Amino acid sequence: MKKLLLGALAACCALHASAAPVEDFIGTWKLERTTVPNYIVIKQEGERLIALRYTRNILGNKITERRFPASYANGDVTITAGETLIEARSVNDVATVTMLAEAYKKISSSTSAPTS
């Protein structure tokens, strides 16, 4: 009986300790505190996961795209972003994305490029 209770407790704890699945990260995320286009799109390209950052170029008023390789493990998305620090991680089993301490909010499950 003791083994049964310990097994049930371990299974319960394992379920509670789960992290956000990769599907929760895939989609379009927009910077919460601005109306200026500033997006991060996380999507699957074949077997690879990638992150794209879209920002408006002030000089030409055009949206620029930067691509970064990404990978998923243990509830976090690791993004190789060079000098641009993007963190995508699970906080209390909820997918979150930040860049340089600014929060992004998921606005859609679409992974297409923003148009404005």
Image (tube, helix red, strand yellow):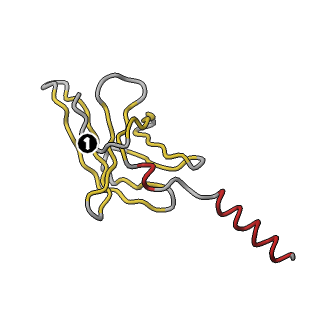
The correct choice, above or below, for 48 with respect to 39 in the image is below
What amino acid does circle 1 point to?
Answer: Ser
Give the secondary structure at mark 1. Answer: loop
Q: Position of residue 67 (x, y in %)?
A: 24, 48
Residue positioned 48% across, 49% down in the render: 89
Q: Is residue 7 left or right of residue 101?
A: right
Query: Which residue is at the front of the view, 21 or 88?
Result: 21
**Residue displayed at 31% across by 56% down:** 44
In the shown orientation, is residue 73 left or right of residue 70?
right
Residue 26 screen position, x and y as percent: 38, 49
Residue where numbered disc 1 is placed: 112
Q: Quadrant of residue 59?
A: top left
Please, is residue 116 above or below residue 98 in the view? above
Height in image: 107 above or below 47? above
Q: Nearer the viewer, residue 10 or 103?
A: 10
- Examine the image and state in which quarter residue 107 appears: top left
